Amino acid sequence: MKVVKARPPWKHKFTCKGCQTELEAEASDVRIGTFNACYYAGDNGEQKYYVKCSVCGTDHIVPDSRVPQDVANGAKADRD
């Protein structure tokens, strides 16, 4: 099959909460991790997509609604 018009690459622009740097994350930057876990209480936390600031290392949650399926699949594959 021939692709007539491809979807542009996924990007997520944000300002770092830690160092105030303006950044643009690409699909390969997205990871999936567990947040808000309390292991003493038996709470396993929530699985969330995130990117890490390349300047200061602060994690930034990317809302599920902003993560297309192919990017989500890539993040899950990198985790496994």
Image (cartoon, rainbow, N blue to C red):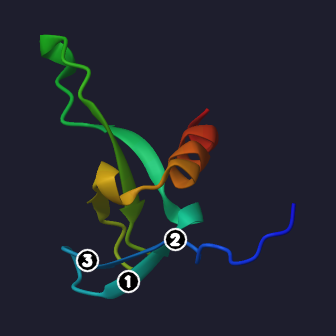
Amino acid type at mark 3: Cys
List x then y, in percent, for residue 13. Answer: 35, 80
Q: Nearer the viewer, residue 27 or 69?
A: 69
Residue at disc 3, secondary structure: loop
Image quadrant where residue 76 sits: top right
Q: Which residue is mark 3?
A: 16
Q: Residue at x 51, y 48 (%)?
A: 69
Q: Residue 33, which numbered label?
A: none
**What is the C-alpha distance between the residues marked 3 and 1?**
7 Å
- In the rendered structure, the answer to whether residue 76 lies left or right of residue 53 reads right
**What is the C-alpha distance between the residues marked 2 and 3?**
19 Å
Confirm or deny contact between disc 3 and disc 1 (CB under 8 A): yes
Q: Which residue is mark 1?
A: 23
Reading the chain from its start, which is encountered first: label 2 or label 1?
2
Residue that lies at the very extreme toward the right in this rendered image: 1
Image quadrant where residue 46 sits: top left
- In the rendered structure, the answer to whether residue 60 lies left or right of residue 40 reads right
Amino acid type at mark 1: Leu
Residue at disc 2, secondary structure: loop
Q: Which residue is mark 2?
A: 10
Tell me if residue 13 comes above or below residue 57 in the rendering: below
Residue at disc 1, secondary structure: strand
Confirm or deny contact between disc 2 and disc 1 (CB under 8 A): no
Q: Residue at x 36, y 67 (%)?
A: 57
Q: Nearer the viewer, residue 32 or 37?
A: 32
